[in-house]
């Protein structure tokens, strides 16, 4: 090995606005300009270590990309198996939407059933490295379960703050790991503001506040995996559901890093934002041709995306412009239709955020922003069993029968269903 192999691949933290540098600590805003801090790497070191072959031989989780993540070689990884989720080649949905090549990144199947396990696995690892004994977060729902589960695995306590109107599946999906669950009478933006104050006063690792620079990096693996699963190429166009905008910036950063380290050719994907109409501050700015994101008060069934004041909105708009992407919105009705369409064409039951992605993809194709000949990846980021309320009244009830053949056939005859017609004929 060369001397470089012993060097640290992490330079430290760097302000995205004024480029001031900070040491690797639990800090997320620049003390001079209040800009967000981001992890800075030495790509020469990463280049020396990372290769397609080494990655392919790595663990069957997001940690196969450890060389690109902000952890130290001797860190105890808090790993419950996040990542390396299926990239499904869509046939039926592609045909229904009129696309030649559509792939679905199915992140519904992570350990706590959303992509949030990726950023939290990094944040929890880093929290242990820094010596924190409490893991915490302000959550729109999915983060709650991911933080509580990783805290359980790490053997530390967790304090989870959620808006009190959260879906039942998300509350239970967090409570089962025995966190201190705090339901705040307010929307996410109010929960987040409260948590910022708590983070100032208590020495806790808030994964999406003081640990945010490290947390956010975990979402890069959504780009890495897609590139690897496509046989080391970038898609032409990706569609991403957006709340705070963090994941969107990191999927972009992930593809850029693969190009920078020569694991991918230079060509990067076009990046498009999918938002719920009832909470669409970024898409609205895009439609108005401005980079000035105006906060809104959310009103949508896509609660996991209900962030009215998105921290990374400005950067998302810059990426849309730089990559040649677009933004689109989906009404509550379109979200439900999107969930059903995905389930009934591909057998993937996504939560409302997935409905947003599919509904927006459909509209982006209709408006010509996504071209039919592009290789498209749609990110499906959370599991439908967590938002059952959204579709509970949309599915056919079970047919009630007694435990006899006669009873079944009586009911079967009355069925107004193509299978019945075929069977009788
Ligand atoms: C949190 C979340 C998002 C959005 O993530 P941001 O990084 O805040 O934009 C998308 N989908 C699901 C299912 C989520 O839970
Ligand atoms: Zn700064």
Image (tube, rainbow, N blue to C red):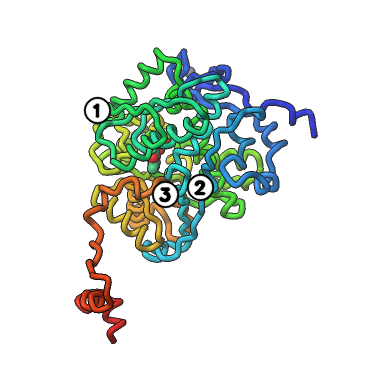
Q: Residue furthest front?
A: 403
**Label placed on residue 186:** 1
Examine the image and state in which quarter residue 291 appears.
top left
Q: In the image, which is nearer the foreground, mark 2 or mark 3?
A: 3
Q: Residue furthest bottom?
A: 425
Q: Which residue is mark 2?
A: 269
Q: Nearer the viewer, residue 284 or 22?
A: 22
Tell me which numbered mark, 3 or 1, is placed earlier along the sequence: 1
Tell me which numbered mark, 2 or 3, is placed earlier along the sequence: 2
Respond yes or no on whether mark 1 lies under 8 Å from ligand 1: no
**Label placed on residue 380:** 3
- Asked whether residue 317 is in view, the answer is no
Specify whether 91 is left or right of 422.
Answer: right
CA gap, disc 1 to disc 2? 37 Å
Q: Measured along the vertical axis of the image, is residue 1 above or below residue 357? A: above
**Residue found at x 32% / y 47%:** 352
Q: Position of residue 254 (x, y in %)?
A: 55, 40
Q: Position of residue 2 (x, y in %)?
A: 79, 32
Q: Secondary structure at mark 1?
A: loop
């Amino acid at each position: 090995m060369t001397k470089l192999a012993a060097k640290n691949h992490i330079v430290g933290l760097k302000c995205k606005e004024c480029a001031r540098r900070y040491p690797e600590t639990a800090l997320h805003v620049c003390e001079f300009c209040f800009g967000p801090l981001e992890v800075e790497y030495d790509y020469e070191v990463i280049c020396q270590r990372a290769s397609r072959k080494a990655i392919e031989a790595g663990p069957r989780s997001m940690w196969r990309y450890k060389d690109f993540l902000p952890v130290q070689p001797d860190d105890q990884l808090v790993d419950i198996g996040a990542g390396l989720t299926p990239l499904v080649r869509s046939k039926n949905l592609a045909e229904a939407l009129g696309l030649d090549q559509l792939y679905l990144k199915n992140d519904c199947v992570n350990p706590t059933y959303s992509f949030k396990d990726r950023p939290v696995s990094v944040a929890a690892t880093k929290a242990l490295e820094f010596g924190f004994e409490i893991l915490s977060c302000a959550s729109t729902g999915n983060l709650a379960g991911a933080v509580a589960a990783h805290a359980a695995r790490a053997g530390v306590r967790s304090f989870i703050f959620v808006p009190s109107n959260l879906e039942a599946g998300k509350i239970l999906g967090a409570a089962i790991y025995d966190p201190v669950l705090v339901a705040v009478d307010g929307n996410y933006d109010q929960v987040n503001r409260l948590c910022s104050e708590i983070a100032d006063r208590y020495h806790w690792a808030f994964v999406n506040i003081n640990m945010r620079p490290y947390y956010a990096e975990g979402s890069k693996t959504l780009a890495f995996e897609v590139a690897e699963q496509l046989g080391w190429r970038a898609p032409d166009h990706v569609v991403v559901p957006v709340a705070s905008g963090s994941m969107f910036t990191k999927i972009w950063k992930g593809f850029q890093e693969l190009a920078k380290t020569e694991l991918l050719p230079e060509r990067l994907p076009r990046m498009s934002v999918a938002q719920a109409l009832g909470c669409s501050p970024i898409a609205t700015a895009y439609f108005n041709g401005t980079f000035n994101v105006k906060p809104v008060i959310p009103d949508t069934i896509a609660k996991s995306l209900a962030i009215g004041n998105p921290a990374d909105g400005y950067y998302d708009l810059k990426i849309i412009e730089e990559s040649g992407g677009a933004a689109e919105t989906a009404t509550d009705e379109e979200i439900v239709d999107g969930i059903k369409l995905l389930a009934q064409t591909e057998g993937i039951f996504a939560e409302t955020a997935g409905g947003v992605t599919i509904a927006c993809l459909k509209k982006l194709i209709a408006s010509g922003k996504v071209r039919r000949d592009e290789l498209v990846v749609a990110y499906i980021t959370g599991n439908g069993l967590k938002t059952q309320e959204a579709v509970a009244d949309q599915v056919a009830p079970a047919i009630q029968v007694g435990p006899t053949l006669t009873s079944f056939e009586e009911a079967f005859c009355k069925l107004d269903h193509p299978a019945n017609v075929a069977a009788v004929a």
